[in-house]
Image (cartoon, rainbow, N blue to C red):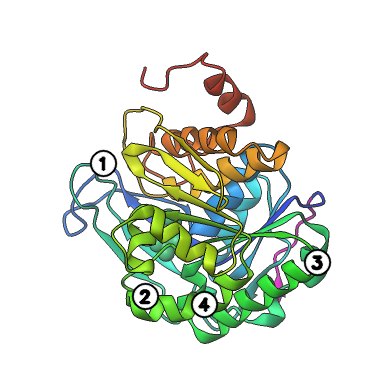
Amino acid sequence: MTHVQDRGARPDFVTIGEALAVFIAEPPARLATASDFRCTVAGAECNVAVGLARLGHGAVFMGRVGTDALGEMVPRGLRAEGVDVSHVRRSPHSPTGVIIRDSAYGRPAEVAYYRTGSAGSELEPDDIDCEVLAQCRHVHISGITAVLSPSARAAAEHAAAEARTSGCGLSFDPNLRRRLSTVHEARDAFARLLSFATMIVVSADEATLLAETPDVNSAEEWFMERGASLVVTKRGVEGAQATDGSRRWSCPAHAVSVVDPIGSGDAFAAGFLSRWYQDGDCLAALRAGTVTAALAMTSAADIDALPTRADLEAILAGGIDARR
Ligand code: KDG
């Protein structure tokens, strides 16, 4: 087992999950007929780390990749974005996970995963550097890690427990992946993580599925009953809302010309967390999240159009119309 060498600033945020290489058909095409693909970095928690780094935060990503070429490309791509990858481990016997996908909007995007037995799914509790968690402000984990493998779930739970012991905030985005688990299996797999999370960042459809209610507000209560003190719900074209159990905030979506929505939920999390840690202004954080999510949708790759802090602030101040 080797480490990807890097030196990063003291982190504000740590994200933990599976880093993937993604091959995106460009121009958009059915995978069976596409001949041109662009190769870049993906993975929900990587996207959040890149989003936070673009916004000027110290962001550490923890996970595993292979010793194959993609296991070199992925950390290099993350490092180029300012993410600290010094805690990414490289497994010699397993490949880096891969996604091959279309970049469609307005029709279902075709997504093929090649992650069974991947290095990322071999993540285990020993891979988590607790000293780094103890120094950071906030840890972000998604439900993907909880259903990748038993050892990945154990690693996520270990990190969550350590984060809370150290007094860090912990956000959890369920990120249901129906090809990795049923909703029922996911609910079981998420139970401990939900009990550790201080903040839930969830899409409305996933919230209602997990809570088994058609009502988003009732679904938010379901999450709060499991321990979170803030539930943030992404509502797509309807914007986003949040509650701390006694107060409610909501904000509309930010209008853009959408190229590809994949990765926008992760972008939302980055924008929300960045603004939330400024002063705990939930409405301002929702606005930052919706704008960051909208901008991410203006390019095919998950991370390309994530805003810098200057971009985000200019748009929030009303200076730029991203539809032009
Ligand atoms: O949220 C975007 C992710 O879906 C994508 O980058 C890949 O992590 C991924 C997954 O498992 O789908």
Dot 4 alpha-carbon crowd within 10 angstroms: few under 14, some 14 to 19, many 20 or more? few
Work out which quarter of the rendered image holds the N terminus and state it: bottom right
Q: Which label lies toward us, 2 or 1? A: 2
State the predominant SS element of the stretch in magenta: loop
Q: Which badge, 2 or 4, is on the more N-terminal residue?
A: 2
Magenta range? 1-8
Label for residue 27?
1
Residue 152 location (% of width, % of height): 56, 79
Label for residue 180?
2
Q: Name the kind of residue labelled 4 in the image.
A: Ala
In the rendered structure, are the residues bearing label 3 and label 4 in contact, judged by CB atoms less than 8 Å apart? Answer: no
In the rendered structure, are the residues bearing label 3 and label 1 in contact, judged by CB atoms less than 8 Å apart? Answer: no
- Residue occupying image coordinates x 57% and y 51%: 244
In the rendered structure, are the residues bearing label 2 and label 1 in contact, judged by CB atoms less than 8 Å apart? Answer: no
Work out which quarter of the rendered image holds the C terminus and state it: top left
Q: Is residue 272 magenta?
A: no
Label for residue 166?
3
Residue 114 location (% of width, % of height): 37, 71
Q: Quadrant of ligand 1?
A: bottom left
Mark 4, secondary structure of its residue: helix
Q: Which badge, 2 or 1, is on the more N-terminal residue?
A: 1
In space, the residues marked 1 and 4 are separated at their CA atoms by: 41 Å
The answer to whether the residue bearing label 2 lies less than 8 angstroms from the nearest atom of ligand 1 is yes
Q: Residue furthest top?
A: 319
Does residue 19 appear anywhere in the picture? no
In space, the residues marked 3 and 4 are separated at their CA atoms by: 21 Å
Q: Is residue 208 left or right of residue 28?
A: right
